[in-house]
Amino acid sequence: MRLPTLLAVACLALTGCSTPYSPPVVVKGSPNFIGLADLLSPDQPLDVILVHGMCTHDKAWATGAMTQLAAAMDANVAVQKSDAKSLAPMATGLPSIELVPGKAVIAGSELRMTGIVWSPLTAGLKQQLLYDNTGDPTDCATDATCKPKRATINAAAKDKLLNDCLADAMAYQGKSRDTIQGAMVAALEKALSDSPPNSRIVLISDSLGSKISFDALSAILLSPKPSAAKDAAARLGQIFMNANQLPILGLADQVITAGPPVVVTEKAMPPSLPSDSLKLFLSLRSKPASDFKFNATGPSLAVIAFTDPNDLLSYRLLPSRYATPGVALSDVLVSNQTTYFGLIERPDTAHTEYMANPGVATAIACGIPKSARCK
């Protein structure tokens, strides 16, 4: 019997399990927010762009996430089947990002979706770590292949969280950042350029995918050339962030300086606090349209961050850190899996199960409080 099954049986026997943030809880001081259901209109298209986070993902992730969104809107509409479209291979012969389109008709309104699968970009680098993945134990003193014994939980953390997931962050924060960012700029330009001029645009991003997306969106806004993608980037009206990693990823962009350490609290944000990718994007988006030489002032923007407190790789957003005129920021606590005896929630699923969490999917689809347009 596997460990999760054993824990579940023990929970039933001892009633020692809980999901403290199911349904999701909006942190005091954060505004409530609307969901996709209230953005649907027969006269105005709704475009949703989904970007995955750390760990290996493929087309199945995109189609699964889009289907979950449609189902969460209580419409029970499956995403229409459509062939995945890849960007043209880069001149260097590097793997390409895959764009997976989807569409659903909900209450007479069209929901257009695009899943951006950037995982192929780092797959080759991560192959270097596979030699140390857990396998059937061997006698490392005599056998030609050494596969050490690992405890079950440690093995899962090593193989998934370290070798597959954290490895993505290491790649992006290192010498491959420019390459990954360039590919992401091309992917977002394609997705945004396909958006009708009057469409509403929503971004749903997970963990590292949020940073990659904000960096790419800032690059698009900073481009000297006017484009449909730049116009759409400024028109972005809602961002849902799952598993926010910006605080820890931002450490890689900072330089150690002399003087007292920067201390961040919820009530006091030091003015010298270094900027991160979200702050840069928000500051660029708030500039007058004339600064970018295109005609788009952009609507007000809502940023909603979902965080499982037991997700070891994620951090609350802290709205005061990103206070920007015209931007509403919301911190939302969720429980992705069961907490066992108040001691532990599986660290792998705590970080990777946001879109599979019915509470998160419903909040994105219907808002908090739940829209009257949802059943």
Image (tube, grey):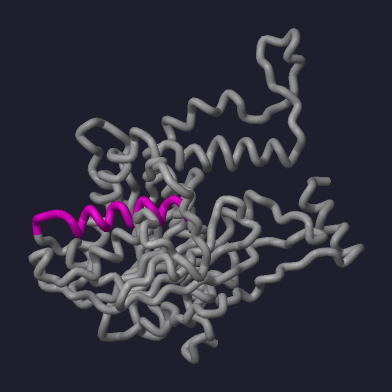
Q: Is residue 39 left or right of residue 315?
A: left
Residue at far right of view? 13
Q: Main secondary structure of the magenta part?
A: helix
In-front residue for pair 66/240: 240
Query: Which residue is drawn at the image coordinates 47% and 76% (left, top)?
Result: 365
Query: Which residue is drawn at the image coordinates 55% and 70% (left, top)?
Result: 360
Query: Which residue is drawn at the image coordinates 41% and 80% (left, top)?
Result: 106
Q: Is residue 105 above or below residue 144?
A: below
Q: Position of residue 350 (x, y in %)?
A: 63, 56
Observer able to see residue 100: no
Query: Dividing the picture into quarters, in which one does residue 199 lie?
Result: bottom left
Q: Is residue 268 above or below residue 96?
A: below
Query: Dividing the picture into quarters, in which one does residue 226 lie?
Result: bottom left
In-front residue for pair 157/276: 276
Identify the image quadrant of the C terminus: bottom right
Q: Position of residue 288 (x, y in %)?
A: 15, 72
In-front residue for pair 208/49: 208
- Asked whether residue 170 is drawn in magenta, I would say no
Q: Is residue 213 left or right of residue 313?
A: left
Observer able to see residue 285: yes
Q: Is residue 129 left or right of residue 200?
A: right
**Residue range highlighted in magenta:** 207-225
Q: Position of residue 244 (x, y in %)?
A: 49, 58
Q: Position of residue 307 (x, y in %)?
A: 56, 63
Query: Which residue is drawn at the image coordinates 59% and 42% (left, top)?
Result: 161
